[in-house]
Image (spheres, grey):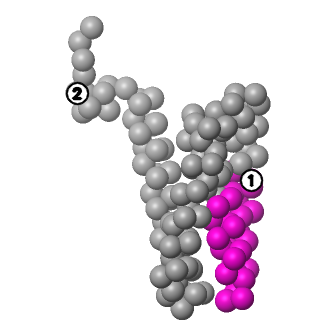
Amino acid sequence: MQSLTYGQLIRGNRNFRNLLAGQFISELGNWFNFIAGLGLVRLVSDASPTAAGLFFVARLLPFALASPIAGTFVDRFSRRQVMIATDLARALVALSFLLVTKRQFCCIRWGRFLMGQRMRLRRIW
């Protein structure tokens, strides 16, 4: 069996090319979400470094908490149903950011945490 370079693999394998393009678009969306969330935190908290730090913790904590159990969870249910349920939950959480005011800063942290949990489940596949 001959090994292929990345260029040959991308040119010669349509499924891999589609997977790579989808992953690129997904990661780009994740980064746009991160930048928008950080901007919202800075705007609502008057650019507080503590608030930015809590935002980072809320972004990383779901990965640390969900990693040990997420694989078992998604193996027990239909992947399609889990993906649809988590996509709908993420959409609701993302839309809830539109309702945030200065007094509701804790909602941003919880929303970021919940979106991170959903992303953790998606990365298992």
Q: Is residue 26 magenta?
A: no
Query: Where 47 sits versus 119, above or below?
Result: below
Query: Where 32 sits versus 100, above or below?
Result: above
| Mark 2 burial class by Cα count in 10 Å: few <14, some 14-19, many 20+ | few
Dot 2 lies on which element?
Answer: loop
Q: Which residues are magenta?
A: 87-114
Q: Is residue 101 magenta?
A: yes
Pointer 2 or 1: first along the chain: 2
Q: Tell whether 75 sits left or right of 67.
A: right
Query: Where 84 sits versus 92, above or below?
Result: above
Q: Main secondary structure of the magenta part?
A: helix
- Label drawn at residue 123: none
Instruction: Determine the image quadrant of residue 111.
Output: bottom right
Residue extending farthest top: 1
Residue depicted at x 72% and y 83%: 104
Three-letter residue code for mark 1: Leu
Dot 1 lies on which element?
Answer: helix
Image x and y of residue 46, in percent: 54, 91
Pick the front one: 62 or 96:
62
Instruction: Determine the image quadrant of residue 91.
Output: bottom right
* Whether residue 119 is visible: no
Marks 2 and 1 sit apart, C-alpha to C-alpha, by 38 Å
Image x and y of residue 125, in percent: 57, 34
Image x and y of residue 118, in percent: 65, 50
Residue depicted at x 75% and y 28%: 76
Image x and y of residue 77, in percent: 77, 30
Instruction: Read off the residue under disc 2.
Output: 5
Instruction: Read off the residue under disc 1.
Output: 88
Pick the front one: 38 or 109:
109
Pick the front one: 97 or 56:
56
| Mark 1 burial class by Cα count in 10 Å: few <14, some 14-19, many 20+ | few
Three-letter residue code for mark 2: Thr
